[in-house]
Image: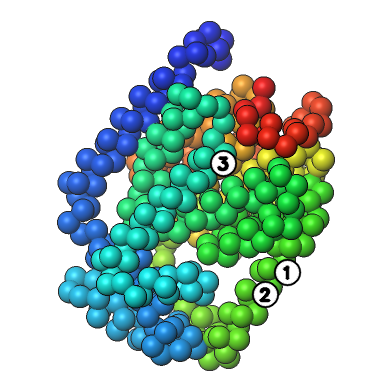
Amino acid sequence: MIAYVQARRRLLPAVGLVVGLILVSWDLLAAAGTFVSQYAVRNDFRLDYGAATVGIKSGYSHLYDLAAQTSAIENLGPGFNPQPFISPPPLAWLVTPLLVLPFTAALVVWTLLLLAALGWTWYLLAPSGGVAKGAHLALLLGVFPVAFGVMVGQPGALVAAAVATAWWLLRHDRPVWAGAALSLIVLKPQLALLVPVCLLASGHGRTFGAWLVATLFIGLVALALLGPDGLARYRDVLAQTQTPAWDITRRYSISGPLGLGPVLNITQVLVAAVALLAAWRHRGQGPELPIAAGIVGSLLVTPYLGFQDFVMLVVAGWLILRAGASQWQVVVMVVGYALLQFAIVVLALPILAAEAVLLVSLLRAAPTPTRPKIGSELRPAK
């Protein structure tokens, strides 16, 4: 199979472009038929907008007051379904400037921001140029979890852009700024929580230190704004995620098949250890594989994950390609991409298995430690 693909390697960019465009067309058709009419009321941005409204009108100590959240969402108009806002406070801060706009206009701006974040991530990370570069963009926008994430206003694209920016800054010898950029993973931390630690394990101590300082600063500001009462409310809201009503948030995570308990905790420790070992084995060889290990490890460790969060696997895949992916890693990524496209049908187990195989594959040491010159990192690895 590998020999067959290699013999037709020149055709792959064109095939990828065609496949990507077909998938984008299918996503647009599906959205037009089932989603556009309810775009506003079904969009998760309503939770962020409602939380930002609560923070401004009632004070941030009430940010996780469920009654205040419900009132803010219901005031958006008929048909809006109230649900708890459980994201960290910085997501509400980010949305706050959009309160000057009516909800529908703010939603359009938010959607454009997510698309811009995906475009920025693609521009920085996607290897190759010409048709191949275009193919990567089409495949990114076409795979259904990514398209769905944009449809429902999930901030995963912003986390992807933060990680991509951190990589770019590292490759341009700006480790402190890379750490600062990486602190933006606080918008949805479970998507890349192990990335800073994996960078530390691989020798990027200054980036880890800058991330830690920036994250601690954000955390202290959040604590000051929430106060004791707000923090207690946040703990109460997070406790709800342990109930059966939140099982949907575990459908694509490792806690789906393992449940919440000791087996999950042991598995999480093992996965984190493998991710850190993989990062350590690539110390001094560039940030690509340590970041990729941190991403895949984070997605496997977190007990809460929606399939729209798999946008991060595309980021990990691009980083692995830049580092010089082996033939079998490419096969695993192609199979994984197909699984993501049919995630609603195949559910979690095959995707979890593909993630685990990809993570274990990162344990292999690179044949020669190299560090591209400034500018050369923007070209694909040979």
Q: CA distance from mark 2 to mark 3?
A: 27 Å
Instruction: State the image coordinates of residue 54 (x, y, percent, origin top left).
Output: 39, 83
User: What residue is shown with label 2?
Assistant: 217
Residue at 32% across, 36% down? 24
Amino acid type, callout 2: Phe
Marks 1 and 2 in Cβ contact (< 8 Å): yes
Amino acid type, callout 1: Val
Which one is earlier in the sequence, the residue at label 1 or at label 3?
Answer: 3
Instruction: Tell which of 132 and 159 is nearer to you.
Output: 132
User: What residue is shown with label 1?
Assistant: 213
Q: CA distance from mark 1 to mark 3?
A: 25 Å
Residue at 27% across, 35% down? 25
Marks 2 and 3 in Cβ contact (< 8 Å): no
Residue at 40% across, 34% down? 138
- Image quadrant holding the C terminus, namely top right
How dense is the environment of label 3, judged by Cα within 10 Å: few (below 14), some, or many (20 and up)? Answer: some
Occupied quadrant, residue 192: bottom right
Q: CA distance from mark 1 to mark 2?
A: 6 Å
- One can see residue 274 in this view: no
Amino acid type, callout 3: Leu
Drawn side of residue 101 relative to residue 34, left or right = right
Occupied quadrant, residue 23: top left
Q: How many marks?
A: 3
Q: Which mark is residue 124?
A: 3
